[in-house]
Image: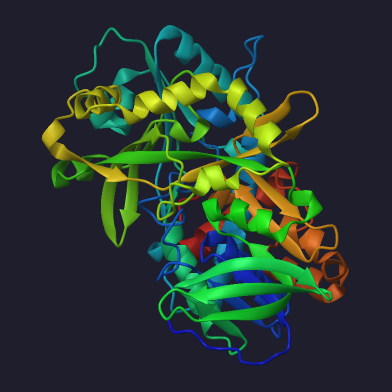
């Protein structure tokens, strides 16, 4: 991609900070809704989607709540809560609609470049976990969004579903799994770059790589953004009517620099990760699914272990993990000073409170950092009993910065999710947090438009365009089974995916 320069003193309509999936999604939506908008995008690295959106960094490839057990917690009374799973499944269907629109608009893009049907499975062992999985399956059958899910405790059938997982396992061990053939594998790095390529073709859009935003300040009704070209050292100031901070782990420090009242009290807790990457082609070829298990007690939700088939750069890959860890960096390419520099007078109490309440989590992360290769192999063998060390190598994953926010009861709480923080006047917004993140990017950005472009969103032009891009816009897929089924059939045809039978 090349970048165009906007030398005009006139204020830009939009500045997007960070070239990841969130900025790409917002930029694509805004350009469709109002084609004459002037947009500049600033990214501190030399390519798009190099941090959390990159396939090797992203733990969430097609999160649709089909197999992720952390979205369906078991309550103290033994029941299983499924409201979050329903919300995520619905949001993923919204994302698929928008991606279908983009594919139809650009007939030179094959959907296989970023999305592919891949079965989603949950797998557990032990009587207590099997009981939980059956309860989860039964509850999910209450929602048509999970039509097509199959449950089994039959080891012969499970061996057909996932042979590598079952080979070498104790035949007396009680096991169970669910399977959803409607699952997908999404390469969000590839998808992000496709959207930016489309934006780049617009004469009113400029993308600047190796550019770091240093300061943000509201003055005379506009945002003044100080940017440094990391290649030349040149600094310049641009003015914008609206700013979106979609810089992943780098969003919190920029939100603090913006100094809006709504951003006070937020902190961040960084969690790093690693994968075991299979290097044996024969093993890679024999597994074709995303198999998720239960997280270890005290582990963060993004550390739910899974044996994960992926398509990366046109090649089939197999990953296991992620193994969690702790780093004070907010970005994979960040600084060790990121965490200490983020501590401010307005968030120090929430951060201390959240830290004291999550000492077991901190201990867990430190223990993960200290793991030996043999320790990681033991964890892998829970899912692949015959795993051999020589077939796997360690790969560093991306950084996740979990949200810490003020809480009137506890002082501060650590949240595992995403949070849109926006100014009262709608002139600036930031996205904090992580999972399920990328998979629900379209729904998140629609929420942002409601906050920051409320009048435009009410207009007939925007409403009509949104219905073109997202046919279910304004309606509930979780409450309308017929609409949900029709939408799935339509998007499956465009994106060349499995359909429910």
The structure residue drawn at horizontal position 43% and vertical position 61%, both measured from the top left corner, is 189
* Residue 126 in sight in this render: yes
Relative to residue 377, is residue 329 drawn left or right? right
Image height check: is 397 above or below 27?
Answer: above
Q: Position of residue 10 (x, y in %)?
A: 73, 89
What colour scheme does the image use? Answer: rainbow
Judged from this view, the residue extending furthest toward the bottom is 8
Image height check: is 401 above or below 155?
Answer: below
Judged from this view, the residue extending furthest toward the left is 390
Q: Nearer the viewer, residue 456 or 5?
A: 5
Q: Position of residue 47 (x, y in %)?
A: 41, 70
The structure residue drawn at horizontal position 28% and vertical position 31%, both measured from the top left corner, is 160
Relative to residue 12, is residue 409 drawn left or right? right
Question: Residue 445's quadrant in the figure?
Answer: bottom right
Relative to residue 51, is residue 267 drawn left or right? right
The structure residue drawn at horizontal position 36% and vertical position 46%, both measured from the top left corner, is 397
Q: Position of residue 99 (x, y in %)?
A: 55, 64
Image height check: is 490 above or below 137?
Answer: below
The structure residue drawn at horizontal position 64% and vertical position 33%, both measured from the top left corner, is 351
Q: Nearer the viewer, residue 318 or 321?
A: 321
Q: Position of residue 408 (x, y in %)?
A: 80, 28
């Amino acid at each position: 991609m090349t970048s165009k320069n906007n030398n005009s003193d006139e204020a830009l309509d939009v500045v997007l900070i960070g070239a990841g999936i969130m900025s790409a999604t917002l930029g694509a939506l805004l350009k469709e809704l109002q084609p004459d908008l002037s947009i500049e995008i600033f990214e501190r690295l030399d390519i798009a989607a190099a941090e959390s959106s990159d396939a090797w960094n992203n733990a969430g490839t097609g999160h649709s709540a089909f197999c992720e057990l952390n979205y369906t917690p078991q309550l103290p009374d033994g029941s299983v809560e499924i409201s979050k799973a329903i919300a995520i499944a619905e949001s993923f269907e919204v994302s698929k609609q928008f991606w279908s629109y983009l594919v139809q608009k650009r007939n030179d893009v094959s959907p296989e470049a970023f999305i592919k049907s891949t079965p989603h499975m949950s797998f557990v062992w032990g009587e207590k976990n099997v009981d939980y999985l059956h309860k989860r399956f039964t509850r999910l059958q209450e929602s048509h969004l999970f039509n097509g899910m199959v449950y089994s405790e039959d080891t012969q059938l499970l061996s057909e579903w996932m042979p590598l997982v079952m080979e070498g396992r104790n035949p007396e061990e009680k096991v169970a799994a669910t399977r959803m053939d409607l699952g997908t594998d999404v390469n969000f790095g590839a998808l992000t770059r496709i959207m930016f390529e489309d934006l780049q073709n617009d004469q009113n859009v400029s993308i600047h790589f190796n550019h770091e935003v240093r300061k943000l300040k509201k003055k005379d009704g506009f945002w003044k953004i100080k940017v440094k070209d990391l290649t030349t050292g040149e600094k310049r100031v641009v003015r914008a009517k609206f700013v979106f901070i979609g810089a992943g782990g780098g969003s919190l420090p920029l939100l603090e620099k913006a100094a809006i009242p709504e951003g006070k009290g937020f902190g961040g807790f960084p969690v790093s990760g690693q994968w075991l990457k299979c290097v044996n082609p024969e093993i890679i070829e024999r597994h074709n699914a995303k198999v998720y298990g239960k997280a270890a007690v005290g582990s963060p939700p993004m550390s739910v272990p899974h044996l994960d088939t992926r398509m990366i750069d046109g090649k089939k890959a197999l990953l296991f993990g992620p193994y969690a860890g702790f780093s004070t960096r907010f970005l994979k390419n960040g600084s060790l000073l990121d965490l200490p520099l983020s501590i401010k007078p307005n968030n120090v109490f929430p951060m201390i409170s959240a830290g004291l309440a999550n000492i077991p989590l901190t201990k867990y992360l430190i223990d993960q950092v200290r793991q030996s290769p043999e320790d990681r192999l033991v964890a892998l063998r829970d899912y692949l009993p015959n795993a051999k060390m020589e077939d796997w190598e360690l790969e560093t994953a991306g950084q996740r910065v979990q949200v810490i926010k003020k809480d009137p009861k506890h002082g501060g709480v650590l949240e595992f999710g995403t949070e849109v923080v926006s100014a009262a006047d709608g002139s600036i917004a930031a996205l904090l947090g992580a999972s399920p993140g990328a998979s629900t990017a379209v729904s998140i950005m629609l929420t942002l438009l409601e906050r920051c472009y409320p009048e435009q969103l009410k207009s007939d032009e925007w409403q009509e365009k949104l219905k073109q891009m997202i046919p279910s816009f304004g309606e509930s897929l979780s409450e309308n089974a017929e609409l949900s089924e029709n939408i799935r059939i339509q998007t499956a045809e465009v994106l060349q995916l499995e359909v429910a039978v």
